[in-house]
Amino acid sequence: MPAENKPVEPEQVMLLRKMNFFSRKSKVESRKIFLSLGAIALSMSAAAQTSEEQASDTVGVNDFRLEEIVVSAPVMQSTVSKQEIKHAELNRDNTGQNLPYLLSVTPSLVTTSDDGLGIGYTYFHIRGTDQTRINMTINEVPLNDAESQGVFWVNLTDMASGVSNLQVQRGIGTSANGGSSFGASVNLRTLDATVPQSSHPGPVRAELDFNGGMYNTFREMVKADVYLGDRLDKKGAWHIGGRFSKVNSDGYIERAKSDLLSYQGEIGWQNMKSAVTLTAFGGKERTYMAWYGVDYNTAWGINGANRRYNPAGEYVDKDGNTAYYDNQTDNYQQHHVHLHIGHRFNIHWTLSATAHYTFGTGYYEMLMADWNTYKADNITRKGLRNHFYGGILSSKYVHEKVDVQMGLALNQYRGLQYGTIDTTCTGDRFMPYYEGFGLKTDGNIYAKANWRVLHRGREKLSLYGDVQYRIVDYKIWGDNEEKSVLFSPEAINKHHTWHFFNPKAGLTYDNGGHRLSATFAMAHREPTRNNFVLATGPEDPKPERLYDYELGYSYSSAGILKSGYAMPWTIGLNLYMMDYDNQLIATGSVSSVGYINTINVKDSYRTGAEFQFGVEWTKWFSWKGNVTWSRNKWKDAAQWRTISFSPDWTAGNIFSFHAAGFNADIQTLVVSSQYLSNDEDPNATLKAYTVTNLMMTYALPFHTLRNARNIPDITLKCQLNNLFDTKYVNNGGTDGTYVWYFPQAGINVHAGFVVQW
């Protein structure tokens, strides 16, 4: 049999065979373990699980890396709609933009930015779904804010520098800790005690990154890791690491300044059977507000209009001059601590536990102007302070034919929303005028299994099943911050308990490079705090339900011999139908601090086809890309209308060149037009746009020198964003009478270097 056609067994299965763990005696013992684990799962009463939606095709200890003992590699079905991005690929183009922009070539993903550069507040949609409906975790711990369900990347600037790998699964995905995924799941991992490959052998690794560019954009990052011992030894191995990042930018939009920092520290120990790691990370941000947008003529620079104009903080002073409040800013910090413990009892099963705590605090400060008398009227601060903590437990069983995983989690959130005002405009006499509170308890319990029905030769057939029960208890009381007249706020008092049952099932068939997968999943999602405080009708917002049907096909070729070179290529096609009940869709309007207003619609759907391809033409040139076609509709009486912020077409294309230490990627993104409201108003749309970026790196050839071990690896990099200086807008909104837009920067250049020891 040709080597490329030989079946590849999961690593843990191969290890089991070598150690003769499939003997009759071992099967009897394993059945006892399986029954014991089943009893444990049935006794779990509170909630949830290790978020694991996007890792390997099977469960297993694999090569016994720390992340796979502490945070169990999950049982999940392999599908065409899953992407995994390694650290090197994620950071190759990293010059300080927030994480969504580093994922911009992911199928069905669209990024937006307030400051026009992707440095300050950035967001993304997948399949038309905004990131409050995308389940995001880091080391299986929920990253989404419990009340808003969003992730604010300015609080975690340069997070990509500390991520060992990142996985994106479109659609519902497997059971996860935190809120349900209504568009996709994104799982970040930082845990990895494996010594990285380097031209400098030894226990210490260090890295220094620096780059600067247009609009006074600078990024500095320093990172160090120490590896001591051997994980194969009884004494085990230690890993101690840390990172500090600083990013500053004036932004393309006027005064859209960003002053961002983040940190990450990790200490871990592991041997062949156990692992313990303590991780702390967080960040602090100060950004000038840029979320108001501008009108059409300004956004497109018509009649010489200033595309960079920012109305935030604008007022007319006592002399009749236009002025801007210099502290119209958002100030927030967030800190996370995770303790992970894992143990492999034997070759068949492992147990992992995680305790976590997150603290966040900050405020918006803004000038409120009296436009009748044209004077500065008052300064307000809207702030929040919150605590999020909980525990996660997961057990995993691996055998020749079946992998089983069971888990639970229990998390609680306590938050305070408050407002203060200074009517003297001196900035030192802030008086409280509202206080609102939130208490949310979220628990879930799950069990899932992957059964390898066939595993012979080139042919494989696996069945997958997953059931999850989730309970959410949510209480809001105090003052409504969004309906608060000064010193006379509207009261709010809401208390809801939801019980959600989320089943999932699928199959995967492999044969000679061909893969066919089919899945069905159901998920539920509770409303956010903003859904409640911004509600205009007499009824409270309803929880959403989603039925997700996916059918995927892919083919991977080992390559066709071409002048002595095997040219590998892949193709993939995924069809999806996402049928919603009571979906909360964006109206296009926003709150006073930029939150998106939504409404429940009884009937709606998102359906489409995602096509991907890749080919390595030569040893120095490769080409990959993706195209998504979709339809996103909601039913208004008897008429079906297009859902806002849902383009029919998106596409990504990358030409990659690499030779003698030089790498260049030409990246092109295409997004078709999209509506800003749900009534298909032709006057409230975003135009289609195409943007091309050029990324280049060159590794200086010090490795060819005689004493290369004593010389650090130095890589130079240069990035040209919007290479053809396209004038485009990627976000906006409307309140029914006024339409606003967020212009993006033309061509902008950034360059720097990376030094590694």
Image (cartoon, grey):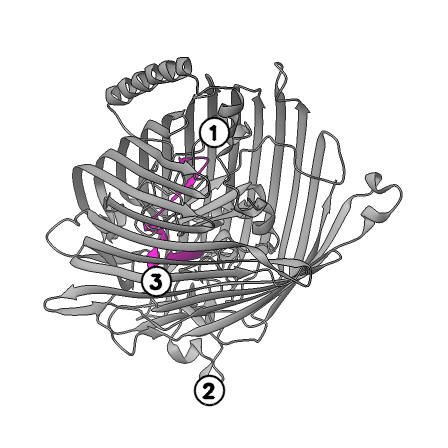
Q: Secondary structure at mark 3?
A: strand
Numbered disc 2: secondary structure? helix
Is residue 662 found left or right of 444 in the rendered image? right
**Picture residue at 41% right of the left edge, 57% below the top:** 124
Q: Label 1 neighbourhood size at 10 Å, few (<14), some (14-19), many (20+)? A: many
Q: Residue at x 78, y 53 (%)?
A: 700
Q: CA distance from mark 2 to mark 3?
A: 41 Å
Amino acid type shown at disc 2: Asn
Q: Is residue 676 above or below residue 101?
A: below
Q: What residue lies at 57% left-to-right and 22% top-to-bottom?
A: 270
Q: Left of 599 or right of it: where is 656?
A: right
Dominant secondary structure (helix, strand or loop) of the stretch shown in magenta:
strand
Which of the two marks, 1 or 2, is nearer to us in this view? 1
Q: Earlier in the sequence, mark 2 or mark 3?
A: 2
* Residue assigned mark 3: 609
Please provide percent x and percent y for residue 169.
40, 48
Real-space Cα distance between discs 1 and 2? 68 Å
Residue named by callout 2: 303
x, y percent for residue 356: 42, 29
Dot 3, how many residues are within 10 Å of its Cα: few (below 14), some (14-19), or many (20+)? some
Instruction: Point out which mark residue 13 bears.
Output: 1
Please tell me how crowded label 2 is: few (under 14), some (14-19), or many (20+) other residues with Cα within 10 Å. Answer: few
Specify the segment rendered in magenta.
122-141
Of residues 386 and 705, which is closer to you in this image? Answer: 705
Amino acid type at mark 3: Ala
Q: Earlier in the sequence, mark 1 or mark 2?
A: 1
Please tell me which residue is depicted at 47% across the width and 22% down the height of the picture.
341
